[in-house]
Amino acid sequence: MSRAEVKESRTVLRRIDAHLRQSHLNLGAQAETVGFVDVIHHRTSPLPALNYVTPRQNTALVPAKDIQQGLAHLRTKGLSVRVRFAEGLFPPFFTSSLRELGLSVESETLIMMHKAEPDKPRKMPRIPSDVAISYVNDHQSMGIWWYVWRNAYYDVFTSTAEPLFIGRDMQSVFEGQQLNLILYRHRFPVGVIRITRHEGTAHILAHALMKEVRTPEWDKLIRTVALDAALHSGCDLIFATGTDEDERRLYREIGFTDSGTILSYAEMSETSSKVEEAAEPSILVI
């Protein structure tokens, strides 16, 4: 990569990292600064995505003693210790320091991103004539959204980088922190989408699709609808997590590129269940 490309990649990762941090704070997590790290923790939820140590923003060099102090701060709260960070923002010896502290890789979250190109107007996806897209803007439509999400007849996909939460949905919609969409076919809900927003970035956090209509074409359609909704909401950087190669291929087909990895390091005793944790949607009830 050229120097300009490296600089651009770092800028994108910083924006994504800032988005995820703010989303965790929006869910009720608190941030405390300890030296050159921030300790993110939640008063009631033990979810890994809400309890971790991370380098302070715009910090490239983090002393090992500061990481130790941050982890000790988590321990005083009775929480499992972990460090989360965007790979690519820190030199290789940062991960060496984590291993020397007895930590190992707990999870790797692959990030896909799409940047708006004002000079290349996007074509709207071809929507079947019997399909309608509706934005959630009241409690009744939010009830339909959750009906789809919790129904066994739908396949659910969610990010492990940002928990899905129950309890402040409409408030978040009114404050512009998220978009929720419902796809209807013959007036019946066949899919839903959730997108979170922060200072020009958008995260395709979750979607669900009725099993009866789930085909590669529908998988691609619902992700394309999510991308266009995020772009039309004014965001110029949209990202998603790719859990496997099939999902990443779908995102590439609609204009996403591989952007980096969010790494989580934890103590050995915490890593034994990493596969199960990564496979389960993170849902927080507020």
Image (cartoon, rainbow, N blue to C red):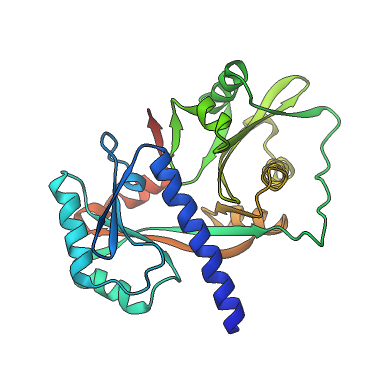
> Where's the N terminus, which quadrant?
bottom right
60 sits to left or right of 248: left
Residue 115, horizontal then vertical, whole percent: 67, 60
**Label total for image:** 0
Residue 169, horizontal then vertical, whole percent: 51, 28
Image height of 88 relative to 261, above or below: below
51 sits to left or right of 240: left
Image height of 137 relative to 57, above or below: above
Query: Hey, which quadrant is residue 134 in on the image?
Result: top right
For image coordinates 18% across by 64% down, the residue present is 68
> Where's the C terminus, which quadrant?
top left
Point out the residue furthest to the bottom here.
Answer: 2
Q: Is residue 280 visible?
A: no
Residue 167, horizontal then vertical, whole percent: 44, 25
Foreground pick, 213 / 225: 225
Query: Hey, which quadrant is residue 285 in on the image?
Result: top left
Point out the residue furthest to the top here.
Answer: 140
Foreground pick, 226 / 247: 226
For image coordinates 50% across by 59% down, the residue present is 110
For image coordinates 60% across by 15% down, the residue present is 140
59 sits to left or right of 247: left
Q: Is residue 114 visible?
A: yes
Query: Hey, which quadrant is residue 33 in on the image?
Result: bottom left
For image coordinates 78% across by 59% down, the residue present is 118
Point out the residue furthest to the right here.
Answer: 129
151 sits to left or right of 37: right
Residue 273, horizontal then vertical, whole percent: 29, 49
